[in-house]
Image: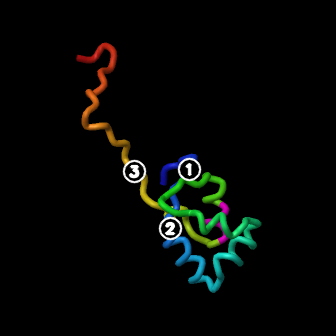
Amino acid sequence: MTLTSTYRPDRDQLFTLIRARGETVTSFAHRLGRHPETFWRLKGGKPISRAFAIQIAGALGTEISDFTLPDEPEQQDPQEEPRQVAGVA
């Protein structure tokens, strides 16, 4: 797995993992010293810090990749001209 500074959580998968361990999202948040709203606001793949992802994975006993979305490749604007690198034709 590549190290990155942020991760995009899959909220549904994260909640499934939490509930599979017999916890509620609220109790899990409190166990991590976090406010429950922190978890309820995880939607749309909004990035979370690497430190937060590590904390969640450690508490769940999983890998970060078990509750995060895959990286999105950078997309170029179709109307934008391809960039030229100096010295390359």
- Residue 30 found in image quarter: bottom right
User: Which residue is painted at 65% across and 81% down in the image?
Assistant: 24
Q: Amino acid at mark 2?
A: Asp
Instruction: Say which residue appears at 52% left-offset and 68% top-offset.
Output: 11
Q: Which residue is mark 1?
A: 6
- Point out residue 61 in the picture as x, y percentages from the top left corner: 62, 72
Determine the residue located farthest toward the left in the rendered image.
89
In the displayed structure image, the side of residue 86 where residue 19 appears, left or right: right
Measured in 3D between alpha carbons, the distance from the residue under mark 3 to the one under mark 2, in whole angstroms, is 16 Å
Say which of 75 and 65 sits in front: 75
- Residue 12 coordinates in the image, percent (x, y): 49, 72
Name the residue carrying label 2: 66
**Which image quadrant is residue 36 in?**
bottom right
Magenta stretch: residue 62 in it? no
Whether 57 is among the magenta residues is yes
Coloring applied to the structure: rainbow
